[in-house]
Image (cartoon, grey):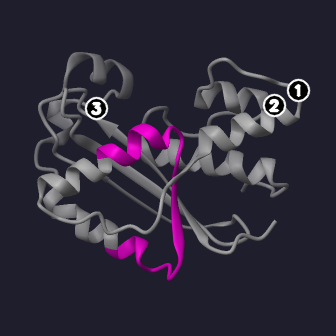
Amino acid sequence: MRLPFETIVLDVETNGSQEHRIVDLGAVRLDRDLRETDSWSSLIDGRPMVLEAIQVNNITDEMLKGKPAFAEVHGQFDDWCAKSDLYVLMAFGAYFDIPILRAEYSRLGRKFPHPGHALDVKSILWWEFLKRGLPCKRLTVDHALELLGMPFEGTRHRALDDARNEARMLQKIHGRTPP
């Protein structure tokens, strides 16, 4: 399968507060044949961290001290994305990650610079599992990897590693051999 666009699979980790400030943003670029060609990531000072978030992503206030605020890194991320002349964003649970990302731009008074609607990796995988006779009531990254017979690579709940594992799953269900 060859896509008519490149794909940027992204993941965000947040501070866990009600306003969900991004503390970790990671993304991988997939070419039209779903091969990873590049990656981008940054820890972002979105303090203070909430205890429940620390327990999930192991990112602490101490780790974020001295890291740039979203206002300082969004331009780098936007420029990195713009290296693709035509791309679509994807995320596992795009219904969460994309609104969080949009909210960060909104806080800065900026228009969301990324084209079109985001695609949801979770929905794509869910559909694939249904076709394979593996219906799931609840689907996590770990469960999806297990159903595909793939190990998690890297550190769980770190944005770049999560994005990379999500990309690997897309590659596998579309007949591409993940690296």
Left or right position of 13 against 172: left
Seen at 49% across and 35% down, the residue is 155
Left or right position of 65 against 1: left
Disc on the earlier residue, 1 or 3: 3
Identify which amino acid the numbered label 2 is placed on. Leu
Q: Quadrant of the N terminus?
A: bottom right
Q: Can residue 43 be seen by looking at this rendering?
A: no
How many badges with numbers are in the image?
3
Q: CA distance from mark 1 to mark 2?
A: 5 Å
Where 171 falls versus 5 (above or below)?
above
At label 2, counting other C-alpha atoms closer than 10 Å, the crowd grade (few under 14, some 14-19, many 20 or more) is: few
Seen at 71% across and 34% down, the residue is 126
Q: Is residue 80 magenta?
A: yes
Q: Is residue 26 magenta?
A: no
Q: Are marks 1 and 3 in contact (CB under 8 Å)?
A: no
Residue 9 is situated, as x and y percent measured from the top left of the image, at 53, 55
Q: Secondary structure at mark 2?
A: helix
Seen at 32% across and 69% down, the residue is 113
Q: Are marks 1 and 2 in contact (CB under 8 Å)?
A: yes
Left or right position of 90 against 149: left
Left or right position of 22 against 10: left
- The residue that disc 1 covers is 133
Residue 90 is situated, as x and y percent measured from the top left of the image, at 53, 53
- The residue that disc 2 covers is 130
Q: Quadrant of the C terminus?
A: bottom right
- The residue that disc 3 covers is 59
Q: Which residues are magenta?
A: 79-100
Where 140 falls versus 128 (above or below)?
above
Within the image, what quadrant is residue 32 found in? bottom right
Within the image, what quadrant is residue 22 found in? top left
Identify which amino acid the numbered label 1 is placed on. Gly
Residue 76 is situated, as x and y percent measured from the top left of the image, at 28, 70
